[in-house]
Amino acid sequence: MSAPLLFLFVIIYFIILLGVAKITGKNSNNMSFFIGNKNSHWMLVAFGMIGTSLSGVTFVSVPGAVGKDSFHYLQITLGYLIGYLAIAYVLLPIYYKLNLTSIYHYLEQRLGFNAYKTGASFFVLSRTLGATARLYLVVKILQVFILDTMGVPFWATTLVILIMILLYTYEGGVKTIVYTDTLQTSGMLTGLVICSYYILKNMHYSFAEGLDAMQVKGLSTVFNTDVNSKSFFLKQIVGGAFITLTMTGLDQEMMQKNISVKTLKDAQKNMVTIGFSMLFVISLFLYLGGLLNLYAAQNNIQAVGDDLFPTLALFHMPPYISIIFILALISALFPSADGAITALTSSFCIDLLGMQRNVNWEEAKKKKIRQRVHLCFAFLFFIIVLVFKWIDNKSIIDLLLKIASYTYGPLLGLFAFGILTKRNLKDKWAFLPCFLAPLLCLALDYLQPYLFGNFRIGQELLIINGLLTFVGLWLISTPNREKR
């Protein structure tokens, strides 16, 4: 199918998003932007958050990794479920009890002002790097497979996509995103099902026969029992639990959608629903990855990793599959990028600028500042995506998990210290262990071959980072004081 025609479908899809945004963004104010006026329905939030949690990385990288890692990613997903349950019954009760707009206000109330600022700063760093990595992957695919042939430069593609996101999030924020994410999750999952069905039909397999063929090729192994491997099943399950606990439960982007739900009970139902839904959906993505590898082998197509799915869908399948792939890919792109820019704007305005504290600012002034911050983050995304192009990492999902290990560790340590202890922190030094712990983890990661031989640290690096932060906070705290 021609590149201009595929691009036309992208434009049509975007026009639909703008229509939804116009309807849902009416009469929006700052509280609509930040937490949807706490009036979001839990079922819409739960369904839309599937798309936010998965993103274009899951849509492309998870199927692409099956050829190398089989179904090992399912180990991490089992850990995700444990993490979602911990968020539902440990973190959400705290957030709702304190009636938070930003979850990092908990750190201020429990540990102090500097701990609060440190936690919010690490969220801004974490989400900025993670979201731009996801955005880069999808922009790269659109560029290589569509827009290069039209003579459009990479920077222009990135700029146009960010402008699209700004146009439908500028006014409504979370109030709009709850609905657009629901639409986009539907598009992504529809693409997953149709592409899987096409390959099964083309190869004359039933669902079970497809799985049998994967087993013969060694593509469907779930559990890695090599203790030395980074993907050893216990490492992956425990690591997956902590990844979810931090990247969802301690992340303002994900939690601002949850705390936009009316009641704690509904928010908990949302979290549990997401946990089981993610397990099911990622299983389907891995199954699709196995089918893609079988299809490529049968047709002698040389494509691996992140290039596997787009190469097959756009060049070796019928035109309608190409259209579905592009629409599903865009559906996977927008929920991760729009929510990230909105959450970063919210956290920067509330946590770092102190918008809610400043009673002298009128609503109109707050809105003007919030809109300027929104634009600035979009520009920052643009710059960082160009940096990722220069780096050109081959596996974005590995890069994302590595970023999470370094940047979410301090958040894990801060919240764990606040929840698990009653010690009184010397707040002015709160930044120090949060800064040093990632540096120690970086050194540990680099020195692995010299320290541990064949043993490799995997997702547990995040836990080590959080533990080092926790120990550092303990050392700068005092006992026998009442909890704030």
Image (cartoon, rainbow, N blue to C red):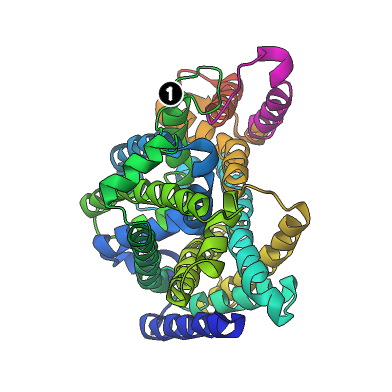
Q: Where is residue 92 in the image (x, y as percent from the top left)?
A: 33, 45
Tag 1: Cα neighbours inside 10 Å, few (<14), some, or many (≥20)?
A: some
Magenta extent = 432-459
* 337 is within the stretch colored magenta: no
Question: Which quadrant does the N terminus fall into?
Answer: bottom right
* 453 is within the stretch colored magenta: yes
Residue drawn at (61%, 59%), measured in percent from left and top?
137
Q: Position of residue 419 (x, y in %)?
A: 41, 31
Direction from residue 469 to residue 78 in the image, left or right: left
Q: Where is residue 99 in the image (x, y as percent from the top left)?
A: 35, 53
Residue topped by disc 1: 234
Residue drawn at (33%, 43%), measured in percent from left and top?
211
Q: Is residue 456 above or below residue 130?
A: above
Q: Quadrant of residue 191?
A: bottom left
Residue 422 shows in the view: no
Which residue is nearer to you in this view: 337 or 219?
A: 219
Q: Is residue 286 above or below residue 342?
A: above
Most extreme residue toward the right is 390
Name the secondary structure under disc 1.
helix
Q: Where is residue 111 in the image (x, y as percent from the top left)?
A: 51, 35
Residue drawn at (45%, 25%), measured in percent from left and top?
224
Which residue is nearer to you in this view: 170 or 27?
A: 170
Dominant secondary-structure state across the stretch colored magenta? helix
Direction from residue 324 to residue 94 in the image, left or right: left
Direction from residue 402 to residue 269 in the image, left or right: left
Which residue is nearer to you in this view: 228 or 35?
A: 228
Residue 211 shows in the view: yes
Amino acid type indicated by mark 1: Leu
Which residue is nearer to you in this view: 26 or 461?
A: 461
Direction from residue 270 to residue 353 in the image, left or right: right
Residue drawn at (58%, 75%), measured in percent from left and top?
371
